[in-house]
Image: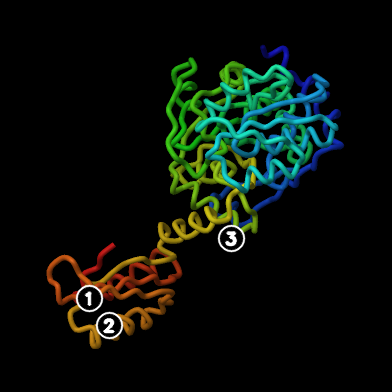
Amino acid sequence: MRQSVTIASIEKAYNDIKSFIHKTPLIYSNSFSKMFSKNIYLKAENLQKTGSFKVRGALNKILKTNPKMVCAVSMGNHAQGVAYAGKCLDIKVKIIMPVIASIAKIEATKNYGANVILKGNTLSESFAYAKKLKDCEFIHPYDDIDVINGQGTLAIEILKDLPEVTDLIIPVGGGGLISGIAAYIKEKKPKIKVIGVQTEKAKSAVESFIKGNIVLKKTEPTIADGISVEKIGEIPFELIKHYVDDIVSVKEESIAKAILNLFERKKLVVEGAGAVGLAYLFEEKSIKTGKNILLLLSGGNIDMMLMDKIIFNALVSSKRILSFSIEIDNFSKEFLEVIRIITKQKGIIKNVIKDSLSITPPFNYNRISFLVETKGENHADKIITSLLEKKYKILY
């Protein structure tokens, strides 16, 4: 297996596909470096063609097999990668997507010239349909040697731009990305540490890595849908066992915080799957890593409505937005006092909602809900303390 994914095979893949892709930038982050007392670098693959690394593997697969038509199953990034690759190479493309796929991702895939077929309520049902197709070359999203070699081309750019890298932190779903990168990196520089990161809502790779054999793990709804995979690929897993140092999982709240920080501090739009590396750093109390850490931002295809919700929830969880309610008896008097307390503490009131139709005792009370912008956790705590000192009951 490892003989098929080598330094030579990945370098050949890179030479074959490089004219069709961006060499994405490596960005040094002053703010994250200060935050973690390490040198933090971001490999911005979210700025790749189609907004994801997936195009690398798709291009290499099509170039290796030279088919008349290709087909793939995906709800997003892989679909767009294959569609773009087919357009570049003048190959017909069929993309099978479940009926629950977002309209935005369906339209994006069509815009690259693919014939989108909606079949099945789940990815598994879409896969079952695709296996019956006889007129096209199937491109698996991760469990394929040519795809893995294509994804591994990222390692060439990483070592060229940051030869002194000590740690790579890479998102993991099916394993195609981390296995290709790790195979190249570890053969070139074995001392570089490679860490994979999953969401806690999809932990097949984590549990498989711990047990030493592939574990099927049912997924739960996640904001990191790009790495929501029930079963890690067989080919990637063999490479991961040999080359990867560790695989960990992170909480959804940490992923949301990472998305917000990347957007706010670096002006980068990164999807949940691409932000798990930064989420891992946020969760680590003591970062047992080397000096130069590279976070791979694997994609940037995030629904803007979801982005809005994620940012708001991240602001609430970090207490930069306070969301609370107070029950008051004398509305005309007490409401003004609450406003005075908040503004005296320099909180910025963003929204107020009055609910006077109480369905629970005491019925004469009014519930007032507030959204207050703060400077952070300490400032938020001061506002709450000031209200509690006046005997107001805070409801969350």
Q: Which mark is residue 366?
A: 1
Q: Is residue 217 visible?
A: yes
Number of residues whose C-alpha sits closer than 10 Å to that of mark 2, classed few (under 14), some (14–19) or many (20 or more): some
**Above or below, comparing residue 179 to residue 271 in the picture:** above
Say whether disc 3 or disc 1 marks the residue closer to the N-terminus.
Answer: 3
Q: Which of the two marks, 2 or 3, is nearer to us in this view?
A: 2
Q: Amino acid at mark 3?
A: Glu
Location of the C terminus (image quadrant): bottom left
User: In this view of the protein, which residue sits in the foreground, 166 or 257?
Assistant: 257
**Marks 3 and 1 close (CB-CB < 8 Å):** no
Whether residue 49 sits left or right of residue 75 in the image: it is right
Q: Which of the two marks, 3 or 1, is nearer to us in this view?
A: 1
Q: Secondary structure at mark 3?
A: helix
User: Residue 67 placed where, x, y %?
Assistant: 81, 21
**Above or below, comparing residue 149 to residue 394 in the picture:** above
Residue ID for mark 3 = 264
**Marks 1 and 2 close (CB-CB < 8 Å):** yes
What residue is shown at x 85% (from left), y 28% (from top)? 16
Whether residue 78 sits left or right of residue 62 in the image: it is left
**Above or below, comparing residue 246 to residue 295 in the picture:** above
Image-quadrant location for residue 59: top right
Marks 2 and 3 sit apart, C-alpha to C-alpha, by 34 Å
User: Residue 233 placed where, x, y %?
Assistant: 57, 21
Marks 1 and 2 sit apart, C-alpha to C-alpha, by 10 Å
